Image: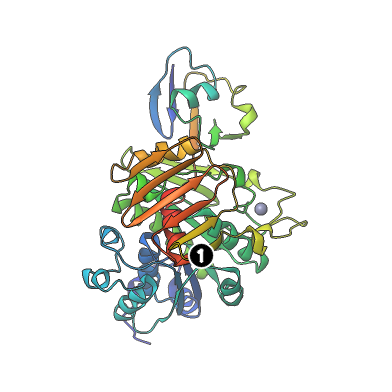
Amino acid sequence: METNRYHRQILFAPIGESGQEKLSQSHVLIIGAGALGSSSAEALTRAGVGHITLIDRDYVEESNLQRQQLFSEKDMEQKMPKAIAARQRLSEVNSHVKIDAIVGDAEVDILRKIVPEADLIIDATDNFETRLLLNDMAQKYQKPWIYGAIVASYGVTFTVVPKKTPCLQCLQEYIPVNGATCDSVGVIQPVVQKVVSQQITEALKLLTGNEAALSGKIISFDLWNNEHVEIEVASLRKADCPSCSEKRSYPNLAYDSHLKTAVLCGRNTVQLRPQRKQTDLNEVAKELQKNNQIKLFQNPYLLSFEVDSFRIVLFQDGRALVHGTMDQMEAKNIYHRYLG
Amino acid sequence: MKITVNGNGLEVQEEVKHVKGLIDFLGLEDKPLIIEHNQQILQKEEHEKAVLENGDKVEIVHFVGGG
Ligand SMILES: [Zn+2]
């Protein structure tokens, strides 16, 4: 190993030589290689984590470049899958790190293979379905994971440690149903770095045997409005939680609970049927209208909007049709981007 | 009455009497919120019982999905 590379990090007393050695033996799974995932992956790669697995189902587009630090105009022109473009850049940054790139959904079958081998999971997803799945998987294999999310100038993060903190399922009542997403209200780049700073600092503590230094709090901030909040949430751990209590059954690992998709034959359309049913179309319309690039149509039964070359129709029972594609993965991306 | 919300001082009118009133005042009534009032986490049904007094501290967090 090079002697100088991690000198400043080793000088930092809580890490030291032994912490650096632990980092080099660690395997971190990063779910999502968008804004948060890019930044987390670069930080962990520079820090000398031994093995990183990246999962992402999207490809690089022009609007990513403002905040997704691993990607270049060339990646965009080539529509490179984010996981692949990220691996390329990361291996230039630190050739000693083993980087696995998976282009696809973070599905039960994939996670079942990776999570048992990982020391830690970093959440860099853009939706709660995946987070609830990852939460159950982390509980099942007793792995810590670090929630992170951003919208506009607001960010929020929380480290879930099995048997110690509440899990995401314990906090389920606080999960927004039609939450604003980055594409309808925008996001500024510094909030990415701020959330990732929190996530990676917590990750370094966990990976170097400094659990006692973990925050134990939900931390949120609004950079534009100069707000910083920390709330101690140990009391929100639920004694009957279906994901982390004695009575756990991991409800989000059941096949039925996933976003179901079906290609509608001959219609160049994909149907999505999410877990959460009943959609307040007016609420959705209100969120969508904040983005003046979206052309909206609404009647009492459905909401239809056009964006890029797609048309999405959302029904009250929660179903969505994505016209203009027969690629299920692409339709899921569009659904989560605009409908949370 | 002057209270502190998310670390910043906030002057609120007399009609804001309890935490629920504050949430309405801030226009956050539609969001699921984790709220701490003077370092005590409140359940939703407690929002209306949590009477605000001068100098109180309220911290409000909400989850978002983007990444
Ligand atoms: Zn739980």
Quarter of the view holding residue A198: bottom left
Which residue in the rendered view is the most extreme toward the front? Answer: A266
Scheme of colours in the image = rainbow
Viewer-nearest residue: A307 or A201: A307
Toward the viewer: B4 or A13? B4
SS class, disc 1: strand
Q: Quadrant of the N terminus of chain A?
A: bottom left
Left or right of residue A255: residue B11? left
Residue furthest out toward the left = A73
Write down the chain letter for disc 1: A
Q: Which residue is mark 1?
A: A263
Counting from the top left corner in percent of width and height, residue A114 is at 56, 76
- Looking at this rendering, what residue extends furthest in the bottom direction? A1
Toward the viewer: A83 or A268?
A268
The spot of residue A197 in percent (x, y) is 38, 58
Residue A122 in the image: state x and y as whole percent. Answer: 48, 64
